[in-house]
Image (spheres, grey):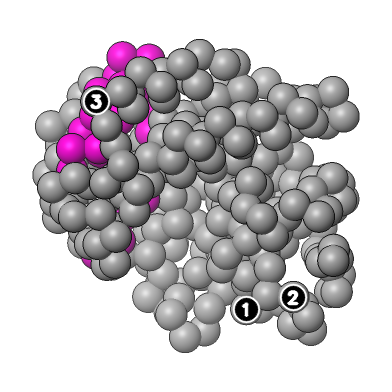
Amino acid sequence: MNEPLSSPSPISPCPIIDIGVNLSNSRFSKDLEEVIERSQQANVSQLILTGTNEQESEAVLKLCQQFAEQFPNMLYSTCGVHPHDAKHFSIDTPNRLKNIATNSEVVAIGETGLDYNRNFSNPKDQENAFEAQLELAIELQLPVFMHERDAHQRQFEILKQYRDHLTNGVIHCFTGDKTALFNYLDLDLHIGITGWICDERRGEELQKLVKNIPLSRLMIETDAPYLLPRTIKPKPKSSRNEPAYLPWVLQSIASQREENLTEIAEKTAATTKQFFNLN
């Protein structure tokens, strides 16, 4: 059964870009084309599909290629191994990721990083997989799309060793504290903000911190189908998030900053295009 929008989504005042969409997730399998069309209607002009392991990295690349003619210059992807899947990272994985990354649709290495919150893979495996992907990003001169949860200090230490050689990096779905934010900004990294900022329960600290992110380092994302913005009224019948809801994230960010909605939309889109070298 399809999951159509049950709430009218606001439309961005200018084209914006969703830097993190899990479009290969099974919750999109029944109405994928409609999901992409709805994002266009909300003025979300480009989507970067997240690769979380070898199989998903191949799957999101295929989606980009499948819809390339229908939605030209709209879909791009990343390729990498999420820390949850680091236990499956093998000696052959970097070469497999490298082969995927040779495709023009692939614009970053990741999702990679550390997650000490759930530890689905042990910390040593996570660190090994993370460093191998940083090395791959350096070799291919691609930016890094990074996850981090409850692992800031160790991730920061590792990144300091590699940062001078990386073209660029973004901490996607940032939910950390002030120390983490300023440490990442000190490394000249970008920060991705999701619907976490729309959460009146968990997002209070992020709401206070977001004004400290230089506009030139800020990017926006849904992380769909996860993190449905809680500011959506009325609440959708489905708990599924989708790219068309990105303007809700934009609105919550604008409510905490000095710049207006249009300025934030324009600047984050320009920053994203430059960061990922998009058409």
Q: Which mark is residue 230?
A: 1
Q: Which comes sooner in the sequence, label 3 or label 2?
A: 3
Quick one: SS at disc 2? loop
User: Taking 238 as reference, is 220 above or below it?
Assistant: above
Nearest to the eye among marks 3 and 1: give it. Answer: 3
Q: Residue at x 43, y 50 (%)?
A: 172
In magenta stretch: residue 140: yes
Q: Is residue 167 visible?
A: no
- What type is the residue that disc 2 sits on? Ser
Q: Residue at x 35, y 48 (%)?
A: 85
Residue beneath label 3, please?
91
In the image, 47 versus 217, the foreground residue is 47
Tell me how far mark 1 sits from mark 2, CA to CA: 12 Å
User: Taking 38 as reference, is 93 above or below it?
Assistant: above
Q: Which mark is residue 238?
A: 2
Quarter of the image for residue 74 reads top right
Neighbourhood count class around disc 3 (C-alpha, 10 Å): few under 14, some 14–19, many 20 upward: few
